[in-house]
Amino acid sequence: MFNLLSKFSLAIAAFALVFSMGSCKKDEEDTATDTDLSMHLHYKVGTEDFAYDQVYTIDGVAVKFTLAQFYVSGINIMNDAGEMHSFDDLFLLAKPSQMDYALGTVPASFGDHLHMVKFNLGVDSVTNGQTEADFTSRDANDPLAAQSPRMHWSWNSGYIFMKFEGEIDTDGDGTTDSTAYWHVGKNNFLRAVELTAHEDMEENHTINVAVDLSTIFTNTNLATDYQTMTMDNMPLATKVADNMATAFGVE
């Protein structure tokens, strides 16, 4: 009788353990939540924080910026399993006056680990080929609507993907003396950026991304290569676009 009771008690205990494990697993599954994801862009020039009208020394040349903005589109995130979540309909006009950008909601099914962030600099060819009616019908708060300063040329050429303006020192005396501008657009100047993140996401999560504007001048001669409207100086525009794609890193 004692053995029978012992076996019965063990069976009850085993059943309770299995039920408890199942309940815990269900509770864990139930606690999975969606993530409200945002991106913070930290503008820098080398190791210094970015500010308009501040004079920086880049490759031995004095430079200051009066405008620095660019389009971000095609934002995707990837988990460790290689699964992607896309924010394909989202366009950002990134500028130093607004460093924080809401990306959207990531479903709980994506998981809580962010492995990689991908995005494009510029806009896709379909968006870039809109008619003037499409353009002017956009809400004023839309990054793709008319901007001041302008972020497009005419509707034969579309958006300016990256626009940097300022002054540069051309005579080596440490004082900026010449107007500088780097306006890069056209479909073939769309550039892809891929960043490894390795972050565990919380219910409200921010991806902190640094962008080093000094990088756009890599392999250029700042004393002479300081003006391009894309088509009038294609080699310089190509360098700026290629360099800009390497200017980002997760902090």
Image (spheres, rainbow, N blue to C red):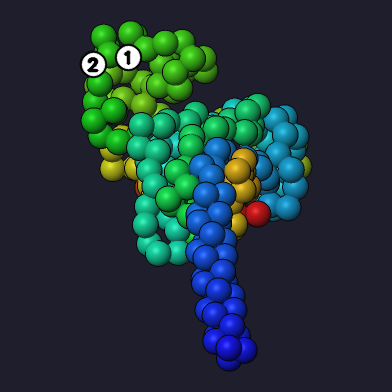
Residue 243 at what x, y percent from top left?
48, 52
Q: Tag 1: Cα neighbours inside 10 Å, few (<14), some, or many (≥20)?
A: some
Is 84 above or below relative to 204? below
Q: Mark yes or no: residue 112 visible.
A: no
Residue at 51 percent across and 42 percent down: it is 34
Helix, strand or loop status at disc 1? helix
Q: Tag 2: Cα neighbours inside 10 Å, few (<14), some, or many (≥20)?
A: few
Is 249 above or below relative to 229? below
Q: Mark yes or no: residue 38 visible.
A: yes
- Amino acid type, label 1: Phe
- Amino acid type, label 2: Thr
Q: Quadrant of the N terminus?
A: bottom right
Q: Quadrant of the C terminus?
A: bottom right
Is mark 1 in CB contact (under 8 Å) with mark 2?
A: yes
Q: In this view of the protein, which residue sits in the foreground, 131 or 36?
A: 36
Extreme residue toward the bottom, this view: 3
Marks 1 and 2, how far apart in space?
6 Å
Is 5 above or below relative to 126? below
Residue at 74 percent across and 43 percent down: it is 49
Helix, strand or loop status at disc 2? loop
Residue 89 at what x, y percent from top left?
36, 32
Q: Which numbered marker is on residue 135? A: 1
Q: Which residue is mark 2?
A: 131
Residue at 72 percent across and 34 percent down: it is 51
Q: In this view of the protein, which residue sits in the foreground, 157 or 201?
A: 201
Extreme residue toward the front, this view: 1
Residue at 40 percent across and 21 percent down: it is 144
Is 28 above or below relative to 105? below
Please state the total of marks drawn on the protein image.
2
